[in-house]
């Protein structure tokens, strides 16, 4: 195997030639690969070079650069000098550069950038003469010292901002660029003195010294808290590292014929086929994304600089056709000439992703299969979030920019740490800030929505919120946010922390109080995409549903049956709970049967409604699973009240409650063990199932019940419960004079069941993997208690992912695979499915597809996600596997 440095460390691009290509993201990072590809296809790009991402982790480990890097960097600098006609460190015609990060996977705003590098007391005078604009030159110098101080020396931004504000106030100007030259010079002097005071050393004046400090700082930024948090959220490997891009500066702050901006080739919020973005004239890129100035909509550039706008449209269409996807582009206009500084795949909302995919199919850019393959399944979550009910009484506070679609209600919170704290405690919060910065990322993760007073559609808040699928309203300029006092005000009205607000990221409106939210209806492009996915996928998708309402909702989302109906959820209410408690406290079989007789018609009615909702599809019903103590009260006052209802002595009821308590109830008297110890419980439930099935069948309904015995550890347990099921079914069929076909299977949620699946398959007609309990019993972790240590495990790298959220394929997955293979070896037509919450996780869906399962089952709102994930899994394995699936 070749060593890590046998390939070049530095890749040049410029003058229509590039050492790299778009296919080299792993080496050049996304930004570097985009710059190289744009250069090659003739897009106007300033010359520069990229330092390979492989150096990032080695530098972070050793804090040293390899010796040959210096030679390659200096050679590349000479090529940039030749391409620009400028010279690095020259007092007459200075070359200035930007130094920017760029990982293979886009991490917007998470790492560092330095602009105007190469300025010092000598070169600033050369820049002033070269541009004929001393104010611009000293403003660029001021920006450089401020950015370098923050990024390289890790100094707080606030002192720099406070000093700048003092000079603006003294001169009576609002914009930094409007400060007189002598004030700019004074600002630079104060900034450099501040660096000296804080670091004990002079601000570096040598351009090469500046460059190496900046390169090191960009590599260091890979391990900032916000970058680490972002990678965790988006499952980006820590071992990827970032490249460093050094690019010749072009200036958008030379005057009103210059500017800078960010634009998408289509709207990332709605998918509309038109430029979508913002710009500022007489500005640099940091002004647009930082929120310090409110940028202008890109459409107005057509009137301000029409030739530049026309060229930008041409470039956007060219890049979109070349990459066959929506592009997120950064640009600078220097005295009327357009330069592209970045292009990358545009992040977009779920709504936009679906529309764009469908329209690109219509335009002939991509195929239906590509449309299905390129949409991250989890993005569909954004289409399924609530919107504000049109009938709601709304109290409008203010209106900002609709930066990320969807609606959310929560209490206002003005600090990211506070948002994280309350969010982890289960409280719905809206993070309100003047403007967000990458340091707020952890609070944004836990908030239901984000609201900012400053910034635009491509500000940090907007980009990050869209990426996470959270509603965001940005640039609500009427809003006065006092973060210290934890309060905001608008038009004399005030909202303090803890008070409810509603944010509508689709319209940009912010309301006081809690508005009623409405579940979205799916149609149009979404249904079209789902039809393509359904034609491609082999894996069926069912819904976990315990009520007729859940069943209808699941079917509306495209579910093809019920994979898990938890019968215990039918007992936690009113008369049912009372009857259930009567059964539990009964002293003999006859007493239990009397109580169960009250429950029978209730269960029968539930099953009948569910069968009707899922008519024509299979319904898997799990018999009673939880331990009995869960149905009884715990507090003495509640026990005394229940004792009165049941005509019992409180102490007698207390004794039953105490007797039913278990040290580890999840491994105690529950599941099939309950049915074996109390067979009358199983008999009642099975009778309710088949009486309901017969009622529906008599009325010409197509009903397909599947009875599932839970927590089976041995074939003997299964046989005992199966005998009751078959006996009661035959009794009902004789009584009703009709036979309903059914399947009898088990839930695989214990390691022993997986290890002896060949024995179970002799009796069971289907296996459904209960991954929640299988994960608990495989890991030896109680899900209820894991919060005490799992966060620590995740933070310190003991485990890569929470096994209750992401299926552990190496451990739990191996047991599942073993059970599938053993089971089908015994019974080739064994039906296989998964019904834990993992059933809606795209990685678990792909795993199930590889194993040749028949279906996955998940909660209603995850059904579309599973359908799309199943189609993507089929595309990934198409032509590589020859599988035989049992008929669903």
Image (spheres, rainbow, N blue to C red):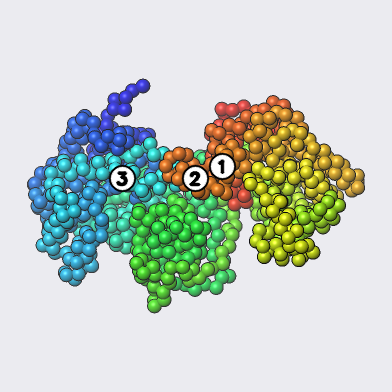
Q: Tell whether 592 sits left or right of 13.
A: right
Query: Residue 614: which numbered mark, if any?
Result: none
Q: Nearer the viewer, residue 423 or 663?
A: 663
Quarter of the image for residue 869 reads: top right
Q: Position of residue 706 (x, y in %)?
A: 75, 42
Tell me if mark 2 has few (under 14), some (14-19) or many (20+) residues whose alpha carbon lies within 10 angstroms of its own: some
Q: Tell whether 116 sits left or right of 738.
A: left
Q: Nearer the viewer, mark 3 or mark 1?
A: 1
Q: Which residue has dot 2 on it?
A: 790
Dot 1: element: loop
Q: First in sequence, mark 3 or 1: give its number.
A: 3
Q: Is residue 208 visible?
A: yes
Q: Quadrant of the N terminus?
A: top left
Q: Which residue has dot 3 on it?
A: 221
Q: Position of residue 185 (x, y in %)?
A: 12, 59
Mark 1 and 2 residues: CB-CB less than 8 Å, in contact?
A: yes
Q: Which residue has dot 1 on it?
A: 781
Q: Position of residue 366 (x, y in %)?
A: 48, 41
Name which residue lies at 39% across and 70% down. Answer: 488
Q: Tell whether 472 sits left or right of 386.
A: left
Name which residue lies at 74% across and 33% down. Answer: 715
Q: Is residue 528 visible?
A: no
Q: Quadrant of the C terminus?
A: top right
Q: CA distance from mark 1 to mark 2?
A: 10 Å
Dot 2: element: helix
Q: Residue furthest top?
A: 1
Q: Residue furthest bottom?
A: 492
Tell me if mark 1 has few (under 14), some (14-19) or many (20+) residues whose alpha carbon lies within 10 angstroms of its own: some
Q: First in sequence, mark 1 or 2: give its number.
A: 1
């Amino acid at each position: 195997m070749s060593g890590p440095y046998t390939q070049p460390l530095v890749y040049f691009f410029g003058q229509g030639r590039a050492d790299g290509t778009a296919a080299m993201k792993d080496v050049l990072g996304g930004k570097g690969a985009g710059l190289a590809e744009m250069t090659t296809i003739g897009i106007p790009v300033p010359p520069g070079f990229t330092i390979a991402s492989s150096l990032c982790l080695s530098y972070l480990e050793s804090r040293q650069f390899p010796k040959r890097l210096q030679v390659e960097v200096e050679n590349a600098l000479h090529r940039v000098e030749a391409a620009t006609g400028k010279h690095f460190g020259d007092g007459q015609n200075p070359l200035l550069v930007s130094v920017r990060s760029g990982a293979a996977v886009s991490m917007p705003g998470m790492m560092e950038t330095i602009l105007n590098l190469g300025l010092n007391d000598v070169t600033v005078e050369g820049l002033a003469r070269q541009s004929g604009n001393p104010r611009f030159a000293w403003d660029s110098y001021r920006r450089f010292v401020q950015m370098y101080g923050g990024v390289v020396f890790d100094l707080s931004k606030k002192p720099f901002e406070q000093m700048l504000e003092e000079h603006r106030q003294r001169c009576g100007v609002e914009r930094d660029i409007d400060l007189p030259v002598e004030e700019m010079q004074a600002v630079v002097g104060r900034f450099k003195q501040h660096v000296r005071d804080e670091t004990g050393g002079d601000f570096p004046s040598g351009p090469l010294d500046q460059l190496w400090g900046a390169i090191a700082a960009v590599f260091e930024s890979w391990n900032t808290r916000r970058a680490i948090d972002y990678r965790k959220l988006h499952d980006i490997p820590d071992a990827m590292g970032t490249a460093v891009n050094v690019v010749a500066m072009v200036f958008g702050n030379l005057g009103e014929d210059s500017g800078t901006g960010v634009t998408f080739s289509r709207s990332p919020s709605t998918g509309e086929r038109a430029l979508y973005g913002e710009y500022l004239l007489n500005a640099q890129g940091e002004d647009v994304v930082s929120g310090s100035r409110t940028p202008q909509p890109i459409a107005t550039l057509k009137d301000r600089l029409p030739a530049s706008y026309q060229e930008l449209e041409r470039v956007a269409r060219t890049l979109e056709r070349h990459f066959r996807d929506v592009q997120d582009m950064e640009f600078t206009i220097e005295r009327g000439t357009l330069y592209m500084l970045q292009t990358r795949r545009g992040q977009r909302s779920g709504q936009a992703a679906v529309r764009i995919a469908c329209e690109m199919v219509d335009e002939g850019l991509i195929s239906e299969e590509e449309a299905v393959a390129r949409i991250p399944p989890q993005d569909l979550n954004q289409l399924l979030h609530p919107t504000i009910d049109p009938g709601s009484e709304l109290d409008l506070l203010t209106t900002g920019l609709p930066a990320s679609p969807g609606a959310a209600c929560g209490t206002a919170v003005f600090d990211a740490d506070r948002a994280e704290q309350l969010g982890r405690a289960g409280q719905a919060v809206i993070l309100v800030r003047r403007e967000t910065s990458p340091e707020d990322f952890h609070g944004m993760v836990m908030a239901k929505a984000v609201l900012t007073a400053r910034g635009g559609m491509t500000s940090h808040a907007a980009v990050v919120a869209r990426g996470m699928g959270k509603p965001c309203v940005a640039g609500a300029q009427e809003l006065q946010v006092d973060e210290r006092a934890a309060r905001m005000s608008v038009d004399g009205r005030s909202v303090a922390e803890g008070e409810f607000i509603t944010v509508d990221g689709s319209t940009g409106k912010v309301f006081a109080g809690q508005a009623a939210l409405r579940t979205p209806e799916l149609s149009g492009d979404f249904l079209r995409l789902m039809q393509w996915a359904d034609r491609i996928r082999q894996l069926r998708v069912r819904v976990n549903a315990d009520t007729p309402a859940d069943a209808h909702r699941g079917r509306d989302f495209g579910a093809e049956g019920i994979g898990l109906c938890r019968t215990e959820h039918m007992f936690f209410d009113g008369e049912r709970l009372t009857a259930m408690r009567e059964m539990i406290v009964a002293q003999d079989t006859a007493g239990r049967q009397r109580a169960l007789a009250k429950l029978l018609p209730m269960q029968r009615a539930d099953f009948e409604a569910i069968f009707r909702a899922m008519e024509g599809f299979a319904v898997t019903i799990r018999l009673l699973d939880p331990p009995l103590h869960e149905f009884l009260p715990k507090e003495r006052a509640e026990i005394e009240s229940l004792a009165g209802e049941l005509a019992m002595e409180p102490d007698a009821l207390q004794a039953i409650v105490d007797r039913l308590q278990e040290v580890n109830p999840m491994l105690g008297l529950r599941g099939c063990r309950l049915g074996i110890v109390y067979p009358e419980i199983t008999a009642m439930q099975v009778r309710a199932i088949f009486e309901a099935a017969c009622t529906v069948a008599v009325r010409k309904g197509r009903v397909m019940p599947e009875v599932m015995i839970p927590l089976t550890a041995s074939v003997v347990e299964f046989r005992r419960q199966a005998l009751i099921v078959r006996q009661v079914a035959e009794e009902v069929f004789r009584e009703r004079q009709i036979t309903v076909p059914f399947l009898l299977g088990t839930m695989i949620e214990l390691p022993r069941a997986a290890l002896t699946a060949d024995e179970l398959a002799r009796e069971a007609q289907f296996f459904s993997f209960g991954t929640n309990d299988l994960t608990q019993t495989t890991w030896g972790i109680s899900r209820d208690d894991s919060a005490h240590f799992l966060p620590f495990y995740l933070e310190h790298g003991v485990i890569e992912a929470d096994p209750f959220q992401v299926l552990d394929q190496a451990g739990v997955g191996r047991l599942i695979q073993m059970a599938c293979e053993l089971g089908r070896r015994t019974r080739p037509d064994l039906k296989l499915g998964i019904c834990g919450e993992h059933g809606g996780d795209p990685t678990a869906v792909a795993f199930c597809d590889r194993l040749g399962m028949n279906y996955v089952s998940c909660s209603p709102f995850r059904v579309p996600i599973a359908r799309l994930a199943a189609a993507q899994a089929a595309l990934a394995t198409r032509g590589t596997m020859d599988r035989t699936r049992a008929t669903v």
